[in-house]
Image (cartoon, grey):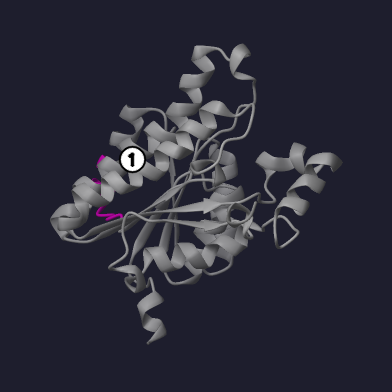
Amino acid sequence: MSLKLFALTGRTALITGSSRGLGRAFAEGLAGAGARVILNGVDVARLEIAANDMRAAGHDVLTAAFDVTDETAIINAFEGFDAEGVAVDILVNNAGIQFRKPMLELATADWRRVIEANLTSAFVIGREAARRMAPRGRGKIINIGSLTSELARATVAPYTVAKGGIKMLTKAMAAEWGEAGIQANAIGPGYMVTDMNEALLSNPDFDGWVKARTPMRRWGLPEELAGTAIYLASDASNYVSGQIIYADGGMISVL
């Protein structure tokens, strides 16, 4: 099998929440495979720093500053892409937030905030991308799930529900848009070394629990997700749709 199947030259990928963390790793991975990437975030200064760093490494990078929970801003961003002749071939729905609180103490507003950021945003951005992919007869959507797409953990109920929803949203996208040549899949990262997990990484008890619970006995690195993203974004996965691939060091495979 030719490695050309994995090449992304000539394709444009929008990665939400990509100025740092997992999103930045996805962007760098796809760019390394030849894609032009569109970085997204709400902090314009941080977005430009990330874009300039990637350009200095020789990558073709655009930026799109919008809030993934603002439907009007999303629609405006895609209309802007249309006006500029930018066709999004690959969408990585990565943006999201975490909020830890026992359910008995959880305010409804906080529940809705997490669901909007982690699940509803993926639907709205996915819809706008698919509306443009479908007439072209091809497109790749990669939603970012989590271990909590399968398993629950105390104090993160809205995140767990949102990521479980990501799994089923991915299947719904595959069911509705497959005939239009769009493949929708998901990646479920395990415990990764990111800014979002900094408090957990620095907690000796939690750090020990992760390492003991994970067969590989370590946390994952963001760049270790890039290969899965390249596969799902490329022609190598053209008959794969509606799936979620867990990159978790084997955690959910063991008791």
Quick one: 77 or 134, which is closer to the camera? 134
Q: Quadrant of residue 128?
A: top left
Residue shown at the point (24%, 54%) measured from the top left = 85
Residue 11 falls inside the magenta stretch: no
Name the side, left or right, on which 243 lies relative to 248: left
Quick one: 242 or 8, which is closer to the camera? 242
Give the x, y percent position of residue 126. 31, 43
Single out the residue that lies furthest toward the bottom.
1
Magenta residues span: 79-88
Q: Is residue 111 visible?
A: yes
Q: Is residue 132 visible?
A: no
Give the x, y percent position of residue 77. 33, 39
Residue shown at the point (58%, 68%) measured from the top left = 57
Name the side, left or right, on which 184 lies relative to 181: right
Residue shown at the point (78%, 41%) measured from the top left = 206
Single out the residue that lies furthest toward the right.
204
Reply above or below: 27 against 5.
above
Residue shown at the point (58%, 40%) measured from the top left = 45
Give the x, y percent position of residue 81. 29, 47
Kind of residue at badge 1: Ile
In what quadrant of the picture does the N terminus appear?
A: bottom left
Would you name the residue on which mark 1 appears? 125
Reply above or below: 234 against 85.
below
